[in-house]
Amino acid sequence: MSDGGTTTLPGVVDHHVHLGLVDRRLLAGGPVTEVHDLGWDPREVTAWAAEPPSGLRIRYAGPFHTAPGGYPSGRSWAPDAAVRPVASPDQAAAAVADVVAAGGFAVKVALHAGMAPLPEDVLRALVGAAHGAGLPVLVHAEGPGEAERAIDVGADTLVHVPWTEELSAGVIARAAHMTWISTLAIHDGPGGSAGLTLALANARRFVAAGGRLVYGTDMGNGPTPVGVNEREIELLGTVLTGEALRRAVLGRVDAAPALAAPLPVPETAADLIAWLRAATRL
Ligand SMILES: [Zn+2]
């Protein structure tokens, strides 16, 4: 929408954050209007969502579902209550019921080739129970074959564009109905360029195949900004432009506009960054 020199747009939706690892109060009243917490103690995140910082909607998945001893068990940033070990199909059904009871919007599953593997029957039970409850399955897939495994078991979303290997054309084609969350900037540090190159190549091929790529920062993973991650938008802008870029970063186009700026509707990543810097909340 345009009124004189001012345009309005929906707010930024960050599809991958960990509010337990940042000062979430810094998000109050900013250009980010919705965040999806993809892994934390369900009791804590439920309380934050009930009383969010001003002007912020918090949706949450609840805990990481993983094999006993699997990723991210034991990681310094992951409290015990953020990790739900699942050892059997029965436990999978109970774990999904707990997500539903806590008001989670999705079931987060961790598949990590370098740690204790989640057995196939348990993975299938998690996906079946989640879909039975009407919840999407969001997978952290890391290491050889894990993205393909997630795709072929019927996961709805990969929470990181695959960065540990180049996916084959056949695997990309089977993923084309999915959503992938960008998190490109987390690979952008020293020693991270190989991962970034692989992620960007996979992202381009996924988008070309018709896949939906959305903005997500993994806020809290390392020294990420608490707010708009301009580097993430810059990297997304090497894959998407124009309306596709706006749809990836901002909320639904038919949602009520949340932001206004005295600039034209942004077409490139640089435009969008400048627009968001100039934006105020409506
Ligand atoms: Zn994460």
Image (cartoon, grey):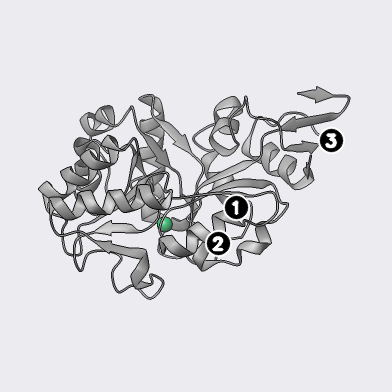
Left or right of 40? Residue 107 is: left
* Mark 2 nearby-residue class (10 Å; few <14, some 14–19, many ≥20): some
The residue that disc 1 covers is 229
Asked whether the residues under the numbered discs 1 and 2 touch, taking CB atoms below 8 Å apart as contact, a structural biologist would say: yes
Whichever of labels 1 and 2 marks the residue nearer the N terminus, that label is 2
Whichever of labels 2 and 3 marks the residue nearer the N terminus, that label is 2
The residue that disc 2 covers is 224
Q: What residue appears at the point 59 percent right and 35 percent down from the top-left corner?
A: 251
The residue that disc 3 covers is 262
Q: CA separation, marks 2 and 3?
A: 27 Å
Q: Is residue 128 above or below residue 111?
A: above
Q: Position of residue 128 (x, y in %)?
A: 21, 39
Q: What residue appears at the point 62 percent right and 50 percent down from the top-left corner?
A: 230
* Mark 1 nearby-residue class (10 Å; few <14, some 14–19, many ≥20): some
Q: Position of residue 246 (x, y in %)?
A: 60, 32
Q: Amino acid at mark 2?
A: Thr
Q: Position of residue 64 (x, y in %)?
A: 33, 58
Residue 70 is drawn in which quadrant?
Answer: bottom left
Q: Position of residue 172 (x, y in %)?
A: 28, 32
Q: Amino acid at mark 1?
A: Asn
Q: Is residue 104 above or below residue 2?
A: below
Q: CA separation, marks 1 and 3?
A: 21 Å
Residue 189 visible to an observer of this rendering: no
* Mark 3 nearby-residue class (10 Å; few <14, some 14–19, many ≥20): some
Residue 149 visible to an observer of this rendering: yes
